[in-house]
Amino acid sequence: MVSIYPSEGINRYGDWRYYFFGFIDGNLLESYYKIYDHITQIKEVSPVQGIGHHIAETMRTMMPLVYFLGLIQVLSFVIMVPNLIPLSIGLIRTVNSPQHILTLANAIGLLALAYGFFIRTEIIMKRYVMITGLLLTPWIGFGIDIILGRLSRISFGRWAVGCIVLLIFVIPADGFFKFFKNPDDLASRAGEWVATNSEFNNTKIVMNDQIVKFHTDLLHNSTHEKSTLLYLDINDDDFCKLQQFAVDNDAKVIVIQGRNNVTDGFKCLSNYSEIKEFKSKKKFIKIFKIE
């Protein structure tokens, strides 16, 4: 699926417009039905079709649940997996006041928007459920309080409480310190280099990574409107479509982000020459300029 997300204006207006217009133009479930059709094709080419209940039938029936579980999975990364247990206990056992219900309704509403976005675009990111995780924090606290209260009444309960409290601080700390051990600044370094390179000031640039584009736009001094264009296609392994998009839009520079295991992935960029590379343990960013 090809997705081009305009992000001009305040609060990523273009992204929101793309999302909500799916309700108007009837394209909200376009990606959903494409995946649905692909699963149907799995059944059609199966050598055992027509015999019993095929796995493809289960997959098609369970697609809404799969999207929901994927959303919960991403939410668990935000609030941390161990907190799912106290969150569940807090939601079930807490007597909610009107203020609690309003906060919970906001959290559910934002989660529903993220669910719709997931179906619309096939992707979901942690930042899309960050506010939901923040709004659910009180129920995590309620659940922890219930668990600690129960444990304090049993033998060796204080030791158990101490271990739980220690884990509450150790697990987030471990996740926090990984950013210092393995800083992921590849996109920011590449975006800064492109933005501060004076020869690109009035040049159209095509990118296949939103984060690189964000850092470039943040620092870019170009007087040319829409000088940076985003082209996303998860199936463009050899970057041929990206190159064609650059040609169609008269872009002189292409910024490509990819995995280091990509082999022979630049055969279509014959008219462009590599001028700069940024590399990390798993990813690379290469900058190409038309010859």
Image: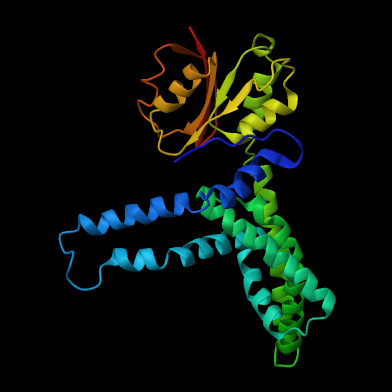
| 192 sits to left or right of 240 | right
Residue 109, position as x, y percentages in the image: 69, 64
Residue 49, position as x, y percentages in the image: 18, 64
* Residue 192 vs residue 282, the one in the foreground: 192
As drawn, 92 above or below 36:
below
Q: How is the image coloured?
A: rainbow
| 258 sits to left or right of 71 | left
Which quarter of the picture shows residue 264? top left
Is residue 136 shown to the viewer in this render?
no
Identify which residue is drawn at 36% across, 20% down: 267
Count of numbered tags? 0
Which quarter of the picture shows residue 144? bottom right
As drawn, 154 above or below 90:
below
Residue 250, position as x, y percentages in the image: 53, 14
Which quarter of the picture shows residue 189? top right
Residue farthest along the top direction in this orientation? 291
Is residue 140 shown to the viewer in this render?
yes
Q: Quadrant of the N terminus?
A: top left
Residue 280, position as x, y percentages in the image: 55, 33
* Residue 247 vs residue 193, the one in the foreground: 247
Identify which residue is drawn at 70% across, 40% down: 12
Identify which residue is drawn at 75% across, 83% down: 94
As drawn, 198 above or below 181:
above
| 4 sits to left or right of 266 | right
| 220 sits to left or right of 285 | right
* Residue 253 vs residue 60, the one in the foreground: 60
